[in-house]
Amino acid sequence: DSPTILRGYAEALMQKAWELSPAIFPSSERFTDWSNRFHGLHDAFTCTSVVAGDMQRHARQHFPGVLSSILPLAWA
């Protein structure tokens, strides 16, 4: 499991992205699910690898150019 401080930081960045442009997220339900997973709320499974994979799948489908510009090739 990732350190709590890193999960909190990632969730804070996600919160800011939601404030700026909620349309980039699949749904408000998915946003809430990801937030719960970062903090282990409501019995959510906290594996950050699962959250990251879900986010990357969404980004590949909807924002492939942006993702490829920021994600190292070895991680793609």
Image: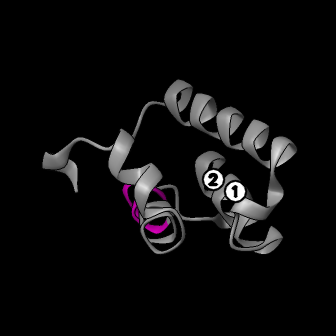
The way the protein has been coloured in the rendering is one colour
Residue 62 spot, x, y in % from top left: 54, 70
- Residue found farthest to the left: 74
Q: Nearer the viewer, mark 1 or mark 2?
A: 1
Q: Residue at x 60, y 28 (%)?
A: 9
| Number of residues whose C-alpha sits closer than 10 Å to that of mark 2, classed few (under 14), some (14–19) or many (20 or more) | some
| Number of residues whose C-alpha sits closer than 10 Å to that of mark 1, classed few (under 14), some (14–19) or many (20 or more) | some
Q: Amino acid at mark 2?
A: Gly
The residue nearer to you, when weighing 16 against 21, is 21
Q: Which residue is mark 1?
A: 36
Labelled disc at residue 40: 2
Q: Residue at x 49, y 63 (%)?
A: 59
Asked whether residue 52 is drawn in magenta, I would say: yes
Separation of marks 1 and 2 at Cα, in angstroms: 6 Å
Residue 37 spot, x, y in % from top left: 60, 57
Asked whether residue 51 is drawn in magenta, I would say: yes
Query: Image quadrant for the C terminus?
Result: bottom left
Residue 1 spot, x, y in % from top left: 38, 44
Write the start and end of the magenta stretch as one range.
48-54
Left or right of 24? Residue 75 is: left
Q: Amino acid at mark 1?
A: Asn
Magenta stretch, main secondary structure, is helix
Residue 13 spot, x, y in % from top left: 66, 34
Q: Circles 1 and 2: CB distance less than 8 Å?
A: yes
Q: Look at the picture and state if 38 lies above or below 58.
A: above
Labelled disc at residue 58: none
